[in-house]
Image: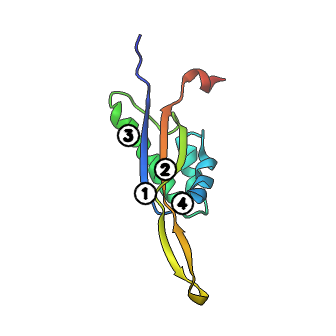
Amino acid sequence: MDTPVLEARAVQKHLRKAPRKVRLVADAVRGESVEKALKRLEFTNKASAEDVLKVIKSAAANLRDKFQEERFDNEDLYIKEIYVDEGVTLKRIQPAPQGRAHRINKRSCHITVLVAKRDQESVNE
């Protein structure tokens, strides 16, 4: 009666890329199957596509490791949740004319991916 929830997650913390730029890539693959997302990210012309790809692969591997008695293909798995949170911001100073100083914010982000097995009922519909 108690069936285990077939899902696993992976987190990449302190990635030195702005969260606004990484969210563009994450939004493109949200809700897709893992196989389709990996293919799409492979040909996406964004620097953060490689980082998102790595986290999705890690989440799929975590699911296979967590439930070793079951067999999972990438077509059976889908991205249930993917979100990009803001990390720490490194504050730097750029010298400016007339003794002033301009602030430079070097942003970072955290990528979280939750991968789950697709239900057979939702596949048939």
14 vs 68: above or below: below
Q: Nearer the viewer, mark 4 or mark 2?
A: 2
**Mark 4 touching mark 1, by CB under 8 A?**
no
Q: CA distance from mark 1 to mark 2?
A: 9 Å
Identify the mark nearer the N-term, 4 or 2.
4
Task: Give the farthest residue toward the top.
Answer: 1
Q: Secondary structure at mark 2?
A: strand
Identify the mark nearer the N-term, 1 or 2.
1
What amino acid does circle 2 point to?
Ile
**Mark 2 touching mark 3, by CB under 8 A?**
no
Q: CA distance from mark 4 to mark 2?
A: 11 Å
Q: CA distance from mark 3 to mark 1?
A: 20 Å
Q: Nearer the viewer, mark 2 or mark 3?
A: 2
Question: Residue 22 placed where, x, y %?
Answer: 57, 56
Q: Secondary structure at mark 1?
A: strand
Q: Which residue is mark 4?
A: 48
Q: Nearer the viewer, mark 1 or mark 2?
A: 1
Q: Nearer the viewer, mark 4 or mark 1?
A: 1
Which mark is drawn over residue 111? 2
Identify the mark nearer the N-term, 2 or 3.
3
Q: Which residue is mark 3?
A: 62
User: Which residue sits at x=50%, y=77%?
Assistant: 93
Nearer to me, 50 or 112: 112
Task: Give the farthest residue toward the right.
Answer: 125
Identify the mark nearer the N-term, 3 or 1.
1
Which mark is drawn over residue 14? 1
Q: Quadrant of residue 25?
A: bottom right
Q: Quadrant of residue 96?
A: bottom right
